[in-house]
Amino acid sequence: MTFIVVEGPEGAGKSTLLRWLAARFRADGRTVVTVREPGGTPVAEAARKVVLGFPYEMAPAAELFLFLAARADLVHKVIRPALAAGQVVLADRFELSTMAYQVAGGGLAYEEVARANRLATGGLVPDLTLVLDVPVAMGRERQRAARKVQDRLERQDDGFHRRVLEAYRGAAGPGVAHIDATQSKKAVQDAAWREVMAVTVLSTRGVS
Ligand code: T5A
């Protein structure tokens, strides 16, 4: 099983790294499925439209359940079948985003959210979570330079985004690796591939 998640704050370079990882795995002859959250199935895309596009405030729990509804459908219909078929799944965001944005940023209770997330994923845990670290201002500047239209979460104030970043910086546990994403794209890719190789070597030795 190879389930790799790329995480980090806005503009950290997640999609850029994910595209590179997909190409790198394909060059090795692996079949790769890439997904981005929220999204990836008709239900998840519908949830994405509401949770990111709705122009006004919504109840924090409503926001949470929209993200989790999207995740539940994506895991059920795309991620688990691909892993069962021996494919590599690369995800742009997963559970850690919920912990960073809805718990650290939005103030929901960690344990309750963790439990709800387990219900959504059936307890699926990534083999590797690459957390890209960039200061809030740099991430926002990259988004501006790329002319990204801000969604509802991105329009939150700097305090919210600092809490999100601190949550990412504090993320720890098996399979979590932090990468300094202020480096060049090439340096980020090299660091990410070293982490992928380390996990692959451990899993082929039966250590996880
Ligand atoms: N959300 C999501 C929650 O609140 N809870 C959840 O549970 C989930 C799953 C999703 C939003 O939903 C929220 C978080 C988000 O607010 P989104 O539109 O899918 O939003 O976008 P993001 O995931 O935020 O992704 P972004 O497009 O903002 O940023 P990326 O993907 O991190 O950055 P990327 O790769 O597009 O790069 C941005 C620019 O920087 C350049 C790229 O070329 C590009 O121009 N770049 C670099 N420049 C210099 N050096 C590097 N190393 C660079 N890497 C990339």
Image (cartoon, rainbow, N blue to C red):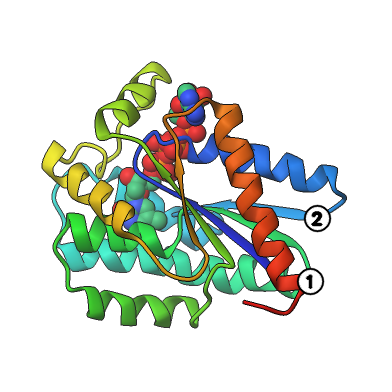
Position of residue 97 measured from the top left corner of the image (x, y, whole percent):
36, 57
Left or right relative to 90: residue 171: left
Q: Which residue is drawn at 27% across and 47% down?
A: 165
Which residue corresponds to the image point at 41% horizontal and 80% vertical from the top-left? 118
Mark 1: is the Cβ under 8 angstroms from ligand 1?
Answer: no
User: What residue did someone put label 2 on?
Assistant: 31
- Relative to 2, say whether 134 is above or below: above
Q: Which residue is drawn at 17% across and 41% down?
A: 156
Ligand 1: quadrant of the figure: top left
Report helix, strand or loop for mark 1: loop
User: Where is residue 95 shown, x and y percent of the image?
Assistant: 41, 65
The quadrant holding residue 117 is bottom left
Tell me where residue 178 appears, x and y as whole percent.
44, 50
Sequence-wise, the earlier of marks 1 and 2 is 2
Residue 53 left/right relative to 43:
left
What amino acid type is highlighted by mark number 2? Thr
Front residue (pair 63, 135): 135
Q: In which quarter of the image is the C terminus?
A: bottom right
Neighbour class for label 2 at 10 Å: few (<14), some, many (≥20)?
some
Label 1 crowd (10 A; few <14 / some 14-19 / many >=20):
few
Instruction: Say whether marks 1 and 2 touch (CB < 8 Å).
Output: yes
